[in-house]
Image (spheres, grey):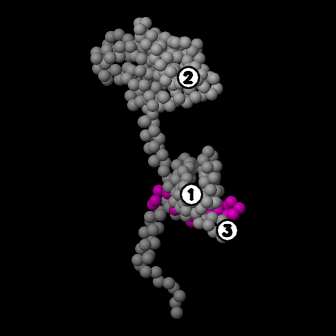
Amino acid sequence: MSSNVIVPDETKESFGQLRRMTQRIPGTIFQLYRSPCGGMRFPYLAGEFSLMRGAERRRLRLDARHVLDRIDTEDFPRVMTAIERSAKSGHTLSIQFRLLDADGETRWMAARAQPEAMKKGTLWHGLMLDISEQVAYQAHLQALSDTDELTGLANRRKFMTRLDEEIARSNRHATPLSLVLLDLDHFKRINDTWGHLQGDQVLAELAALSLDSLREDDVIARLGGEEFALLLPLTPLVCCEPLAERLRRLIAEHDFRLPQGRVTVSVGIAEHRVGESRETLIERADQSLYAAKRNGRNRVESVT
């Protein structure tokens, strides 16, 4: 009598559909086994993903280090800690990390797996997905929320966050910090005379000029309209004044391609005092800016 098992056609079709599906998902269905001594391997892997190709899949069934070694060095300790906690608590393993794929490209991965306690060690059943596109899109949205659309500079929200950070650092270490407020003179006249498109071009060029004249650690932002702000860490007032004057002169001498006249700015600066709040520092810089306007524009003023 034959001992061959006859598999129904419906079952064969179901297995075929499952195989095709696992080959096309943008990630990997896996089992991860961790022995009591800490050694790890992948008893099961399925999915079409450049991270693990034929020969490497076979090696990973014996030793997980072939993929663990590709985890970003900054993320590796966090991944190992998450695995350890999941093994001890029995809670779901849920992690995101950067990983080098087989082509040497860094990918963002998300892994979620349920642990199963074995007589010896722990076995996770899970799914690992490539989320690089989602991470890039989120970073793009974050950049948009922090960036002025016209000039590409930081916007008011981003600048205030950085200002708070630098004030906290100045208060903690008693290091110098200067704030510069810059406002275009008679900007409404530019818009009214040559149109808003020309006005936008002036703002964009002014932003580029200012950015090129600053140091790497300096921060420049468009606060709104024709008002800009510069944050100069580790810079006392005595060093900030010549920098502001150099920028004022650079703008006044630049050819903005207006049919008539030139573009000038009024500049107000203030140095942070240890223990001073953000609002007080901005108010003092504002007073300097108003003084520059009152005293004839196209000039730099400061308060002590």
Horizontal side of 104 relative to 26 (left or right) equals: right
Q: Percent position (x, y) of residue 78?
A: 61, 49
Q: On the image, which quarter does residue 64 sit in? A: bottom right
Real-space Cα separation, disc 3 to disc 1, in angstroms:
19 Å
Horizontal side of 107 relative to 62 (left or right) equals: left
Q: What amino acid is found at the position of numbered circle 1 in the picture?
A: Leu
Number of numbered labels in the structure image: 3
Residue situated in front as seen by the camera: 71 or 276: 276
Whether residue 34 appears in magenta in the rendering, the answer is: yes
* Predominant SS along the magenta part: strand
Is disc 1 surrounded by few (<14), some (14 to 19) or many (20+) residues within 10 Å? many
Q: Which residue is mark 1?
A: 93
Whether residue 133 appears in magenta in the rendering, the answer is: no
Residue 55 visible in the picture: no
Residue situated in front as seen by the camera: 253 or 164: 164
Looking at marks 2 and 1 on the same chain, the residue that comes earlier in the sequence is marked by 1
Q: On the image, which quarter does residue 21 sit in? A: bottom left
Q: Which residues are magenta?
A: 24-45
Q: Percent position (x, y) of residue 82?
A: 60, 54
Residue 157 visible in the picture: yes
